Amino acid sequence: MVKKILGFVLVAILSVTTALAGEDRVIKFESLPAKARQFTQNYFKGQSISIVTMERDFFSKSYEIIFTTGDRVEFDKSGLWTEVECHTAIPQGIVPVRVRASLNRDYPSLTVYKIERKTRKRFEVHLSNGLELTFSEAGQLVEVD
Amino acid sequence: MKLIRKTVSRLSLILSAVLLIWAVFFYFAMINEVNDEIDDSLEDYARELIVSRLSGDPMPIEMSHTNNQYYLSPVSREYAAHTPHINYLDSMIYIPSKREKEPARIMTLIYKDAEDQYYELSVYTPTIEKQDLIAAILFWVVFLYISLLIIIVGVSVWVYEHNNRPLYRLLKWLDAYQVGAINNPVLDIETDISEFRRLNEAALRHVSRSEEVYLQQKEFVGNVSHELQTPVAVSLSRLEALMQDESFSEVQLNELAKTYQSLNYLKRLNQTLLLLYRVDSYQFVERSSILVNSLVADMLEDYQEIYASSGLSVDLQSKGELRLEMNEVLCSVLISNLLKNSFVHNHEGGIVSILITPERLLVSNTGSAIPLDGKIVFDRFYKGEERREGSVGLGLALVRSICEQQGLSIRYYWEDGLHHFELTK
């Protein structure tokens, strides 16, 4: 009886822990959430896709698309973008309006090649001169790295 | 089994099982986390390589001296169609810089470029460090499991003993308590635990109730004896007067004489009971130093005279003076009862032998051929196998009561065909 229970517990532990293993899986573009597909249609229309992966974590899933140009986009479980990185400049529409306004005002000559969605509605933008700036959603500069 | 041992053994049994499950779970979770970290770093590395390659940035050389290394090769469309596009593998791999094979984690990824050409990218990292890490984790998990178990059990033992201290003191007090004794210890257990307080109060309540009942019973016996004295004395004197009447026949006078004897027995019984009651209620308080040797010698003379007809051989040995600090009346009651006992419960031509040393008085006598029960020989109304004429059955009970009161000890034993009563200071 005790052996049975211990065996059961062991199996349960093993299955739970392996289920939590965060290995990547290659998926089809069609398996992405609709929101992510729509985003790709809007901003990367016509680009061919090199690979699409899904990472399953403890509580969440995340997706990543790498285009054959080397540009890449990460999405969260709902299909909302969390990170966009392009070899040259990211499509203008991705950067939130107020953040874009601040950038145009203070750094008109620089381009954004990477943007990340941070917690507490903040955005970190990487500029072509190597600057990393964190903005609030209202376009307020919060941190310079 | 003591309560604490029961508690601790149950506690350690359950805890060891629960903690074991916890430890196993923790161990596997940690291993998983380690593997996950390695996979994550491989994934990051692979993504970096792919992005660099696709966007035309310079690639790092394949055989770098860093931990992470890669192979990149174009593959056919057919190969790509029949091979999983992502694959993880643990394998031995040759490390050129070390010129030997080492365990490594390998991730293989298939992607295509803008010209629809498929490439297979293999990235790998040695896992020697991983083995060390897992061994270290295993060691620490086992170590922490054992030490946690020991600490928890130790702490619970300490807490348990600490908490239950009032309980053990109460048990000790109850063991020591004797109803009717004068020098019982006082119950002074300070505790702020309400259950133990209630237990203490309940114990005190019951003890005082027993004490009350015991006292009432003692007083009742005393009162009855006292009240009986006068009617018995009156009856005796009336009977005596009646026996003077010469109009009774021989048979009637005989009957009257028997009644007289029975009444006399009742009188003595009553007197002894009264004395016992007075001893038990501490009515003899004055003390003096009494030389037992002379007291025994005097009494022995009297008893020899009274029981001269039984043809007993009496022997008195004095090996030093025995002095007792006690009440004089009680001392003579004590000694006379011991001596009388040895004369009464004897047989024709038997032996009475008395030995006095500075520490004890030993009265030995022949009598019934079988030993008496040492546990109940001093009980009230205990009479041996055969009933002796004139024996009330309270003599030895009186002896014990006096000894208890005066701090002496008395014991009975059977040796060499003799009954021994030993009185020790």
Image (cartoon, coloured by chain):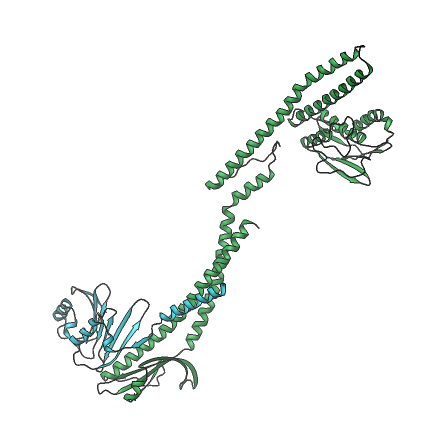
Res. A12 in view: yes
The foreground one among B50 and B22 is B22
Residue B8's spot in the image, x, y percent? Answer: 52, 54
Q: Quadrant of residue B311?
A: top right
The foreground one among B235 and A21 is B235
- Is residue B164 depicted above or below B223 in this figure? below
Residue B12's spot in the image, x, y percent? Answer: 50, 57
- Chain B as rendered: colour: green
Residue B285's spot in the image, x, y percent? Answer: 66, 25
- Chain A as rendered: colour: cyan
Q: Quadrant of residue B60?
A: bottom left
The quarter of the rendered structure image containing the C terminus of chain A is bottom left
Asked if residue B345 lies left or right of residue B327, the reply is right
Asked if residue A112 lies left or right of residue B282, the reply is left
- Is residue B270 depicted above or below A51 in this figure? above
Q: Residue at x 55, y 52 (%)?
A: B5
The foreground one among B356 and B198 is B198
Residue A60's spot in the image, x, y percent? Answer: 29, 68
Q: Quadrant of residue B43?
A: bottom left
Q: Residue at x 49, y 46 (%)?
A: B163
- Is residue B217 depicted above or below B156 in this figure? above
Q: Residue at x 42, y 75 (%)?
A: B129
Res. B358 in view: no
The foreground one among B275 and A138 is B275
